[in-house]
Amino acid sequence: MKVLKEILYKVTLEKIIGNTTVVINNLHFDSRKVSLNDVFVAISGTVADGHKYIEKATFSGALVIVCEQLPDNLVNGITYVVVPDSREALAIMAANFYDNPSEDLSLVGITGTNGKTTIATLLYELVKKAGYNAGLLSTVKIMVDNTTYETHLTTPDSLTINKYLRAMVDAGADYCFMEVSSHGIDQKRTKGLRFAGGVFTNLSHDHLDYHKDFKSYRDVKKQFFDDLDKNAFALVNADDKNGIIMLQNTKATKKTYALKTIADFKGHVIESQMNGQLLRINQQEVWVKLIGRFNAYNLLAIYGTAKLLGLDSLEILQLLSALESVGGRFQYFISHSGVIAIVDYAHTPDALKNVLETINSIRSGKEELLTVIGCGGDRDAGKRPVMGKIAATLSDKVFFTSDNPRTENPETIINQMEEGVPQNMADRVMSIVNRREAIKVASKMAKKHDIILIAGKGHETYQEINGERFDFDDYKIVSEFLNPKEH
């Protein structure tokens, strides 16, 4: 229970009608969850406008209504708070409601197109191995020390963020590592949080169904760094031309990592094999289990972040060498018949290119690379022909199939992928709408030493079709086909 005026601290206000000394029980932006003496924040969403549900929230017992526009009929005894931006107000109120937990631990936000989950998860694991209590807010899961909670959003809503940050602080957490999506930044979910640091990975073609153009997408990411305070650090990938843009207006301490250019944390790939790679980081060598240049970048970001948080260089290198790949991120096994199967979340052109180039750089050339790939429905259609071209160009055989078609016709999605395939490579492409069938055919066609890449869904254990989620796990399914006696 909180006094209203306490949770309105730092919120930009336009008008208040009623009493701000009332005691409230809870804070909600979903009218269905409102009960007696709660606050209802009316948000204009991308699907529905919360202002339409003010009357419903009032009927359910809301004591306070926070809105951008007052309803036509005001109810006696209810306090109305008018704000210019309900999303931002909710985020700040949520932080206040949970006693600003981000101020009681070192919160690090990781943003960029690719690498967020790997960096956040492995930083969590690294500091845990170093003996610290830590939390994780990622696409895959939320961790409060050793307790796991499921999640389905890269950046949860501001109430959920602060609820779990409070749980982390109460559990004694020293650090929290959080994926910060462009949607989360744009929808003000990270407002009211104090970040100890921000990490920028890279920027490539993604989410343009939401942001409309690349500049808007980039500028939303930049906003995260603009908001960091002078006591924080901003660590960016200097090999990505957008990295320097992220640093333009930040008040935070500016740091860089890179493989190609001069940087504060400079890396070099000395040797790469299927079971790992040898890296040189700031003139010190370390063997790591994660392969590929994209993972070299991820590990540089992890090293740099850990250093900026105060960990010792040699200890960080020892801990890096023990880290394992994150589930669904270049997760592989070798079947009894000698076929290598790799499952990866690559669902953007850049990520797919990185994974395929990594595989091609470590194969002998005699084995074939078979790629199973689809594109998500109701998402950025512009990347479909681009991904189709990349898959066909860098693979020996390609199977275009369904990803999460959602409400779109999967055949339409596949047709758009086919449009990007060069004519002279059309014979290496096969289209199979049913994803399970596509994995089955690839598994049957693969010979000893061949490599099957199943891309796009990674850690996901479902397939979303026409509003329904069906059990579907790429790793389990390819395991069933390649090692049938174990299933």
Image (cartoon, rainbow, N blue to C red):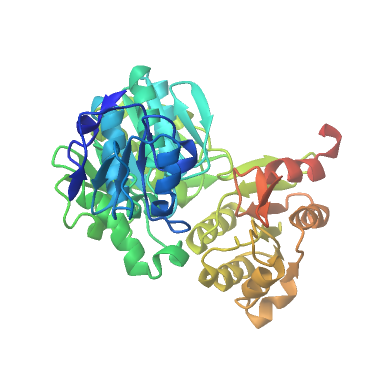
Point out the residue furthest to the front here.
76
> From the viewer's perspective, is residue 310 above or below residue 224?
above
Nearest the eye: 130 or 68: 68
Q: Quadrant of residue 273?
A: top right
Q: Position of residue 132 (x, y in %)?
A: 35, 19
Q: Position of residue 237 (x, y in %)?
A: 31, 52
Point out the residue furthest to the right here.
485
> From the viewer's perspective, is residue 374 above or below residue 83?
below
- Let me know if residue 26 appears in the view: yes
Question: Is 416 left, or right, of 249 in this rendering?
Answer: right
- Let me know if residue 286 appears in the view: no
Question: Is 177 left, or right, of 21 in this rendering?
Answer: right
Nearest the eye: 350 or 163: 163
Residue occupying the point 47% across, 46% down? 271
Report the label total. Answer: 0
Q: Which quadrant of the figure contains the C terminus?
A: top right
Q: Quadrant of residue 105?
A: top left
Q: Position of residue 359 (x, y in %)?
A: 58, 54
Q: Which quadrant of the figure contains the N terminus?
A: top left
Point out the residue furthest to the bottom here.
423
> From the viewer's perspective, is residue 27 above or below residue 436?
above
Residue occupying the point 17% across, 40% down? 10
Residue occupying the point 42% across, 41% down? 57
